[in-house]
Image (tube, coloured by chain):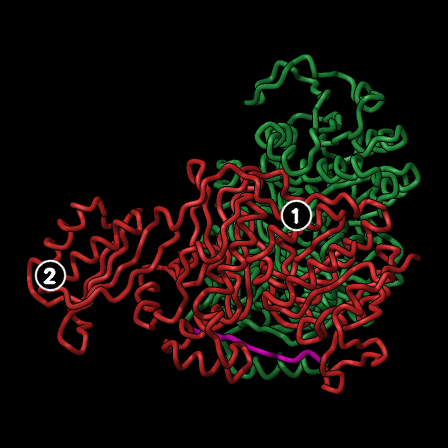
Chain colours: A red, B green
Amino acid sequence: MKTVKAGILGIGNVGTGTYRTLQLNRDKIIESTGMDIEVTKILNRHPDRDRGITIDKNIYVQDAYDIINDPEIDIVVELIGGIEPATTFMADAIKNGKHVVTANKAALAEHGKMLQKLATQNGVMLRFEASVGGGIPIINALTSALLSNDFTEILGIVNGTTNYILTKMTEDGADYEAVLKEAQAKGFAEADPTGDVEGNDVANKLSILLSLVFGVEVPPSRIPTQGITAINKTDIAYANKFGCTIKLLAAAKKVDGKVECDVQPTLIPEEHPLASVNNEFNAIFLHGNAVDDIMFYGKGAGPLPTGSAVVGDMIAIAVAIDKQSAFDSKPLLRYDSDLEYMGEGKNQYYVRLSVDDMPGILGNISSTLGRYGIGIESMMQSTHSKNADETVPLVFIFYETNREVLDEAMEELKNRSFVKSVDSVIRVEK
Amino acid sequence: MKTVKAGILGIGNVGTGTYRTLQLNRDKIIESTGMDIEVTKILNRHPDRDRGITIDKNIYVQDAYDIINDPEIDIVVELIGGIEPATTFMADAIKNGKHVVTANKAALAEHGKMLQKLATQNGVMLRFEASVGGGIPIINALTSALLSNDFTEILGIVNGTTNYILTKMTEDGADYEAVLKEAQAKGFAEADPTGDVEGNDVANKLSILLSLVFGVEVPPSRIPTQGITAINKTDIAYANKFGCTIKLLAAAKKVDGKVECDVQPTLIPEEHPLASVNNEFNAIFLHGNAVDDIMFYGKGAGPLPTGSAVVGDMIAIAVAIDKQSAFDSKPLLRYDSDLEYMGEGKNQYYVRLSVDDMPGILGNISSTLGRYGIGIESMMQSTHSKNADETVPLVFIFYETNREVLDEAMEELKNRSFVKSVDSVIRVEK
C-alpha cells in the first residue's frame, strides 16, 4: 500500500465533508485502489470552533503556505471558496509542483484558463469535480467515458437553492418571497441569497461546462443571466396549464458552428427528464451525437455529497501518482475551439401580457408580432381571471425567435394604449 | 499523435454503432486525447450484407483468430453477444496480450470472474461499459469518481424493452399482450422476447453490478428473477391509486453485512426519480454513504448509444497505453468481499386478492396476517368494482416482511373458502 499526502485549505462545510468522507471510506478506498490518502495538514483559522467532527488538532495550521510549501504534500485541496486568496493559493501550489483539487466554481470561472495553463506547464493535475453539480460525477464523465461524443446541447439544474424555491412555489402555489424565507429558515438559502437567486452561481458553473464540453472561453460576465426573483405563482400556474414546469436552467447549444448559452428560468415540458428534478437536487442533461440524451442526477450541495466529489478527485490523482502518469495529464479545461460564442440565440418564449378587456386586441397583437416574424404556437386568454385593475391576462407561447427581436416587439406592444403591461418573458425548452 | 489498433468481432447493431461512433468523432477524440484509434480488422461472416454504413471491405475477415492472433492489434472488441464462442474469443485475446472491450452481459455474468482473473494475470485491461445501461457511463463512474463511496443500495431500470412495455401499459391502460405486439412491430421487442420479458437480461446486468459495487459473486441463476408477463392493467391502475408506478427493477441492498437482491416488477412512488424514467430509457439509481442519492439516465440500447460506451472504453485503453499504465490496471470486476449473499430479503409488498363480497372477511384476513407478523400499511376495497364472477378485489400494501413468510401466509389464505384467488404479489419500494 502506498500513501499519498494531502493538505486541505479550509475546513468549513465542504472541508469537513471531505475529511469525513475520507474517514468513513478509508478502508474501501485502500481496498479498491491500493492507495491510502492521508491528510497531514489542514488550514483552520478557528481551531477551537466545533466542526462536529473529530480531527487531531496537531494537523491544524494557521498559514496556507505551511501547506503550499510543504515538500511532503502531494495534493493541495482548496476549499476556501471565493476568488481570492483561493486563486493565488492554487497558483502557488501548482508552481510548487502540487496537484490541486478544488470545489471553487467562482475561481475557476474567472481564472480557470490561467490555472489550467499553469498546471500543464508544471506537469500537475488540476481537478474540480465538486465545482459543478456537487456530488454528481459529471466532469469525470465528460472528460473520460463520454469523450466518444460530440455534444450539441447542455441543460443543467445546477443550483439547489433556487431549485428548492421553485419546487416549493410549484407545490404550494406560494410566491417567491414567502418561500425564500422558508428556505432561509431551513438552511437551504443563505441570509444573503443574491449569488444563488440572481443566477450568478449558475453562470459560473455554465462557464466551466462550456470549457469542458465545447472548449470555448466564456467568462460568466458574458453569459446572459437572469435569476428567479421575478418568477411568481401566476406564471408557474400558467406554465402548468401548458404542461410545463419552470426551472432555472444553465443552457447551451451548438448551432451552426456557434455556441449559444444563457442562464434563465425556463418552461420545460413535464415529460422532460429535468422536469421531475425537485427540491435541492441537481441534474445535468446533455445530448451527444452517439450517446443521445443522457442525464446525471444527484445532490448539488451538502458536506458529504460535495466531499464525495472532492475525494473522488483525490483518488484519481493518487492512482495517477501510483501509475507515474500524473505528470502529463491532459488538461480538462480547454479553450482551443473555433466555435464562435454568441449569447442567448434563438428560442421559444412564454409571454404574459395584461391587456384591456375589449374586442380586436388579439388580432392587433398578432399582426404586430407577425411583422417581427414571431409566430404564436399556443395562446391562453381567460376573461374569468381578470386582474385586480380589470385588465385580463393574455398568455402566449411563441415559436422560435431571437430574444432581441422579441424584446423589440414587446417594446412596441407596451406603447399600445390597450396593453397595460408586459408581465413576463420566460424561455421555453421543448 | 499515436495510433492504437483495434479489431472488432461482430458487425451487427452494436458493431456498426461502434464503427460509426469512431467515424463521426475521430477528430474530436484525437483533439481531446492525442490518440487515434484505427479499426484494422472486422470479423464479418456476411460481408455482402448491407449494414447501412461505409466500411472498406478489405478490413473484413472471416476468422476471429485473424484478429485475436494479429500482433499489430492492441484492442479486441467483442460484439458478437451470447456466451460462446464470445467467451473463448475474449479469453484467447487476453492470453495473447490484447486489451478487451465487450458489451456482452451474458458472457460477463457467467464468466466475468475467469475473464477478469485472466486479464489481471496477463496485464491487460478488460472493459465492458456497454454491458449495463447501454450508453450510460455507470461502470466508469462506479470504478473511478464514485470510489469515494460505500454504497448501500442499487435500483436499476436496465432493460429498455420491458420499460417501454410497462410505460405503454401505464399510459394507454392497455394489457401486456397487446402492448408486446405493438413493441415488436416497432422494433422495441424481439420476435422471441423471452430474455427481456422474463427478466433474464436484467439479472445478467444485476450480477455485473453486484460485483462492481459490492464485490460479491452472484451468478444470475441465484438471483430471484421475475419478469413482467404477469403484470396487468388492473395492478397498474391500483398502483396508480396508491401514488405509485410499476417498473421492472434490478434491486440490491446491503443490510447488516448481507447483500439482498432480486429482479422483479416493483411499485415505486411517483416522486422517486426512477418513476419518470419512461419508454426505452434506462436509469441506475444508487445510494452512497457520501454522495447520497444519485441517478444516471440514458439510452440503454441502440447502435450509437451502445457504440458511445464501447468507444469510451476503447479511448480509456488508448489513453492508458499512451501513459504506459495499461499493464497494471485495477480489476473492475471484484469478487473479494466478505458480504454474505442472500436472496430477496425483507421488502414491502402489494397484494391483490379476489374475495367473496360478505361481511367479516377483512377481519379474518388481517388476523391471519397478524399471526405471520405481517402489518397492513394501506388497503383498498371497492364493492363498486366487482370482478366478473361477483367476487370483489381486495388490495393491500404490507409493511416490510420476508417473502417466504408472505408466500406462506398467502398459501394459507388461498385455502379459505371466501378467498377466490391471490391475483398479484408485487414488491414495493418506498
Q: Position of residue B391 (x, y in %)?
A: 50, 69
Q: Position of residue A294 (x, y in %)?
A: 56, 49
Query: Which numbered disc, 1 or 2, marks the residue closer to the eye?
Result: 1
Region rendered in magenta: B373-383
Report crowding for label 2: few under 14, some 14 to 19, many 20 or more residues within 10 A (C-alpha): few
- Residue at 72% in and 59% down: A92
Amino acid on which the number 2 mark rests in the picture = Arg
Mark 1, residues whose alpha carbon is within 10 Å: few (<14), some, or many (≥20)? some
Q: Quadrant of residue A20?
A: bottom right
For marks 1 and 2 on the same chain, the one whose residue lies earlier in the sequence? 1
Which quarter of the figure has residue B153?
bottom right
Q: Is residue B377 magenta?
A: yes
Disc 1 versus disc 2: distance between alpha carbons?
54 Å
Looking at the rendered structure, the kind of residue marked 1 is Lys
Whether residue B161 sits left or right of residue A118 in the image: it is left
Q: Is residue A411 above or below residue B301?
A: below
Give the total of numbered labels. Answer: 2
Determine whether the residue tagged by mark 1 lies in a helix, strand or loop: helix
Q: Residue at x 84, y 47 (%)?
A: B331
> Going by the image, does B266 lie left or right of A308?
left
Residue A416 numbered mark, or none = 2
Disc 1: which residue: A117
Instruction: Identify the subunit bearing mark 2.
Output: A
Camera-side residue of B273 and B199:
B273
Camera-side residue: A178 or B257? Answer: A178
> Residue B47's spot in the image, x, y percent?
65, 15
